[in-house]
Amino acid sequence: MRLPVLLFIVMLSFTTVKVNAQVTPITYAQLQKRINNPDTLYIVNFWATWCGPCVKELPDFDKLQRTYKNKPLKVVLVSMDFQSKLKTAVIPFVKKHPMLASVYFASRKSDQELIDEVDKDWSGALPATLVINTKKHIRKFYEKDFTYTELNTIYQTNKIIKQP
Amino acid sequence: MKKFLFLMLTAVSAVAFKTADGGYKAGDMAADFKLKNVTGKMVSLADYSTAKGFIVVFTCNHCPVAQAYEKRIMALDAKYAAKGYPVIAISPNDPVAEPVDSYANMQKRAAERKYTFPYLIDETQNITRAFGAQATPTAYILQKTDKGLVVQYAGAIDNDQEQANPARTKYVENAVDDLLANKKPAVSGSKAFGCRIVWKNS
């Protein structure tokens, strides 16, 4: 009688999703290397803890990563908070809202330099999102916020199907 | 067929680029406007008969990036108003969606911080659309000419939000200095990082 319960708990502990409370500083050159696996679709969102529409849509980005955690999809969240706010704002935010998506902190010489590197059409307003896959030559840039349905559509239209 | 498709795609993307990137760029002519100041008075650029031009800054109360630049905006007016380039600040946001940017709160902030320049509310958001500002803060330098107001710079105030880099580029100061020296600004545009404009019904 007790065994099934115990087994259930053990199984549960194995299936519990490992969440990230880490925030790694990253330059754009380093980011590019992390988003170039040809068999993965990357959805890279640029956000900040002070950005209202960003904070509102973050749960949907994380939901997308959770929904497709066994698919070749990686949701990457790059914080563009003030350089001095990594420890005082970004890390506490991520601890309070643990996410499965990878969270990075944009390490940059200037905002202008990073903005131009990410996309020449980016005006500089947040939030902004980049959809990337090197093999399918996908590189789409969006300067808007998303609903979960819209994110799911982006995933479905761009998803990478592994060849058997 | 393939070539035709490519041409079509190019045409479509060119149009998309234009909409996304609309608004004033260096070389464009800017239209004057009439907006309500925090004092209750209406202000237009034509009121400034002796000005050589203007530093128009789209800024607001609520945005931390705009707040970080507030003292720099005040310093621009202190430095350049007497030289003929006063600051005109415009709050572009919808106060219904962002109550911190209400007219009453704008009045409060302007009084508390002792703004020396007008702080105007763009209630219809039409002026913000005409300029093409996407984020706060965004600066435009307009030069008065015989033909009208010529846009000489559009973009960020400088490239160093937190003033941590001594080698920062002060885009707006450099451009105004160039204009005062009867030169074309060496840098006429940059990306303005900040809080997206809060549009009505969005």
Image: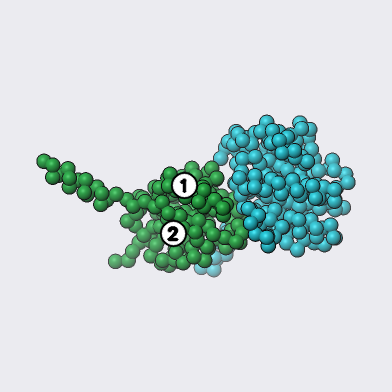
Q: Do the residues labelled 2 and 1 touch (CB within 8 Å)?
A: no
The answer to whether B65 appears left or right of A18 in the picture is right
User: Going 50% across and 56% down the picture, which residue do you hit?
Assistant: A105
Residue B177 appears in view: yes
In the image, which disc is placed on residue A46?
none
3D distance between C-alphas at marks 2 and 1 = 25 Å
- Find disc 1 in the rendering and name its residue: A92
For chain A, what colour was chosen?
A: green
Question: Residue at position x 56%, y 54% from top?
Answer: A83
Query: What's the amino acid at mark 2?
Result: Tyr
Q: Is mark 1 on a helix, strand or loop?
A: helix
- Name of the residue lying farthest toward the left: A1
Give whichever of B148, B76 is nearer the camera.
B76
* Residue, disc 2: A42
Instruction: Name the one closer to the observer, B202 or B186.
Output: B186
In the figure, A110 relative to B106: above or below?
Answer: below
Q: Can residue A131 be seen in this view?
A: no
Spot occupied by residue B136 in the image (x, y as percentages of width and height):
64, 47
B53 horizontally vs A77: left or right: right
Spot the cyan chain and give its letter. Answer: B
- Kind of residue at badge 1: Pro
What is the total number of numbered labels drawn onto the structure image?
A: 2
Q: Find residue A16 and report its horizontal and vertical position in percent.
A: 29, 49
Query: Mark 1, chain letter?
Result: A
What coloring was used for the rendering?
by chain
**In this view of the protein, which residue sits in the foreground, B82 or B188?**
B82
